[in-house]
């Protein structure tokens, strides 16, 4: 069914269909066409197909057309989704399949395949790809970026959600205005409201100074709510009100202030399932997910690995090294399962670029998983290092009589420790500033800091 090759075709064919309600009540119409945009079915009034069935969950199931056919996914419903009496979680539907959601019977009717446009260019902002799945996303982002629609970016850790948000901002009319990141996953629950909306001096114990809301910092620009799924449930109604009314009031404040921001959000959690468990408000979900972008895992788009490696080496100022990346290395990379996704690949490329000998093969694959295997170190800021001699070479005692891979991991661990210790000192422990200087994502920087115990778990600052 695929009709896309890099630099030539710009169409991909998806096989959709129609879901028709056979029994029980549904608000008109009693059917819905299934295309490449997900269709959510449930009792919530914001669902694309609303079922008036007390046994159906608020957000019960999702249908989406793909190249493989129409995919049905149960969204953690209480009473389940059944086909032929068997409870299903995630299936592709065959022609005329009948299913039951709660007490509602439905039937899938296939239609002619639909051709949808994907990006003719293998890039969007700093992102590159040649896979149809990513280029379809690029096409969607290029249409969404000029608008003020809220976008919810989902995907596994390391798939590049923050990079997508930055690219959308830079392609929008707000590009010259601030892009402010709020890491909801790092906010202590008791400080969530004050962190989101700001606070006045003396508003609570410990509020010795006034703090400006990131919504005000982003005024005229874009605010990116990273790891939105971690936001405490009691703060969610206040965020919903702020998004709906486009105004905020600081903790301890007496009046509201209007804000003009475009909202982007990201999460690695399944927010729809969180809605059904009561951990996330359905009205907030539909407010932030006007457009939903689900990033595929790297293992699902391995054809992108060669172009990603070239782009990463170019960003490191070492693009010529790509000529020394062998086909065998690329094949090994494409066989890897990539639990850390693009972030894991980027780390391996960075290490390989730093350690390879000029003129020799750039063996990226040998550095996969090296972070998990590095010895733990316990340095403190300002501690002296003996990993490199004053002449700039590594002391022979470091690796004498040891296997190559073991010695290399030890040297790498020392390099990481020294680099991030110095970086933390320069940036005064400010993780956002460290990430900016290192050219890395904040979550990646925090992982290094904790791995080498450079800063305690609660110590890194998230101040911009």
Image: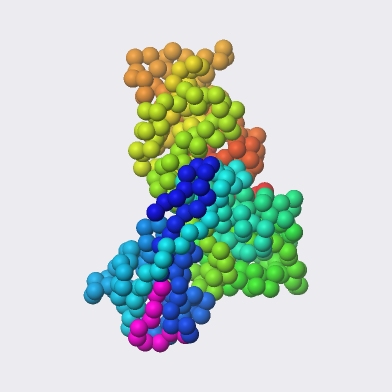
The picture places residue 303, in percent across and down from the top left corner, at 43, 41
Q: Is residue 96 visible?
A: yes
Judged left or right of residue 256, residue 289 is left
> What residue do we see at 58% from left, 61% from top?
151
Q: Residue shown at 76%/72% (left/top)?
A: 255
Residue nearest the observer in this picture, 421 or 271: 271
Find residue 344 and report its image quarter: top left
**Rendered residue at 75%/50% (across/down):** 176
Q: x, y (%) of residue 299?
A: 39, 45
Magenta segment main secondary structure: loop
Residue 211, image x and y in percent? Answer: 71, 58
Residue at 74% of width from left, 71% of height from top? 256
Position above or below: 58 against 347: below
Specify the quadrant of the image occupied by residue 274.
bottom left
Q: Which residues are magenta?
A: 18-27
Residue 26 inside the magenta-drawn segment: yes
Along the line of sight, which residue is nearer the eye, 345 or 209? 345
Quadrant where the N terminus lies? bottom left
Q: Quadrant of residue 71?
A: bottom left
Q: Is residue 89 visible?
A: no
Magenta residue check for 299? no
Judge by depth and name the residue closer to the eye, 109 or 53.
109
Left or right of 429 in this view: 448: left
List x then y, in percent, for residue 447. Answer: 49, 42
């Amino acid at each position: 069914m695929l009709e896309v090759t890099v630099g030539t075709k710009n169409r991909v064919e998806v096989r959709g269909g129609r879901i028709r309600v056979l029994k029980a009540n549904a608000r008109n119409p009693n059917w819905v066409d299934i295309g490449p945009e997900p269709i959510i079915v449930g009792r919530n009034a914001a669902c694309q197909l609303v079922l008036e069935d007390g046994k159906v969950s608020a957000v019960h199931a999702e249908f989406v057309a793909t190249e493989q056919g129409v995919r049905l996914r149960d969204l953690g419903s209480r009473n389940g989704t059944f086909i032929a009496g068997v409870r299903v979680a995630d299936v592709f539907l065959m022609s005329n399949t009948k299913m039951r959601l709660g007490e509602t019977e439905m039937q899938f009717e296939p239609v002619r395949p639909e051709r949808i446009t994907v990006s003719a260019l293998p890039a969007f902002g700093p992102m590159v790809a040649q896979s149809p799945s990513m280029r379809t996303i690029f096409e969607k982002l290029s249409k969404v970026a000029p608008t003020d629609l809220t976008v919810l970016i989902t995907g596994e850790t390391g798939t590049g959600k923050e990079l997508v948000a930055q690219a959308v901002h830079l392609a929008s009319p707000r590009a010259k205005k601030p892009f402010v990141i709020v890491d909801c996953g790092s906010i202590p629950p008791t400080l969530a409201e004050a962190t989101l909306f700001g606070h006045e001096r003396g508003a609570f114990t410990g509020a010795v100074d006034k703090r400006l809301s990131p919504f005000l910092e982003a005024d005229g620009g874009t605010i990116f709510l990273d790891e939105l799924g971690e936001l405490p449930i009691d703060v969610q109604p206040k965020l919903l009100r702020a998004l709906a009314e486009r105004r905020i009031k600081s903790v301890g404040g007496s009046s509201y202030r209007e804000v003009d921001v475009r909202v982007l959000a990201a999460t690695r959690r399944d927010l729809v399932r969180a809605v059904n468990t009561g951990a996330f408000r359905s009205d907030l979900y539909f407010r932030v997910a006007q457009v939903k972008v689900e990033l595929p895992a790297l293992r699902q788009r391995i054809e992108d690995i060669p172009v990603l490696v070239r782009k990463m080496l170019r960003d490191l100022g070492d693009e010529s090294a790509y000529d020394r990346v062998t086909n065998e290395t690329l094949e090994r990379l494409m066989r890897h399962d990539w639990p850390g996704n693009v972030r894991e690949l980027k780390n391996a490329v960075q290490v390989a670029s730093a350690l390879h000998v000029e003129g020799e093969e750039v063996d990226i694959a040998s550095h996969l998983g090296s972070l998990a295997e590095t010895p733990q170190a316990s340095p403190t800021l300002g501690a002296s290092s003996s990993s490199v001699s004053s002449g700039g070479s590594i002391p022979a005692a470091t690796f004498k009589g040891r296997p190559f891979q073991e010695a290399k991991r030890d040297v790498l661990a020392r390099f990481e420790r020294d680099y991030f210790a110095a970086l933390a000192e320069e940036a005064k422990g400010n993780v956002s500033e460290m990430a900016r200087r290192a050219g890395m994502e904040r979550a990646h920087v925090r992982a290094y800091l904790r791995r080498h115990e450079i800063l305690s778990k609660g110590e890194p600052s998230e101040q911009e």
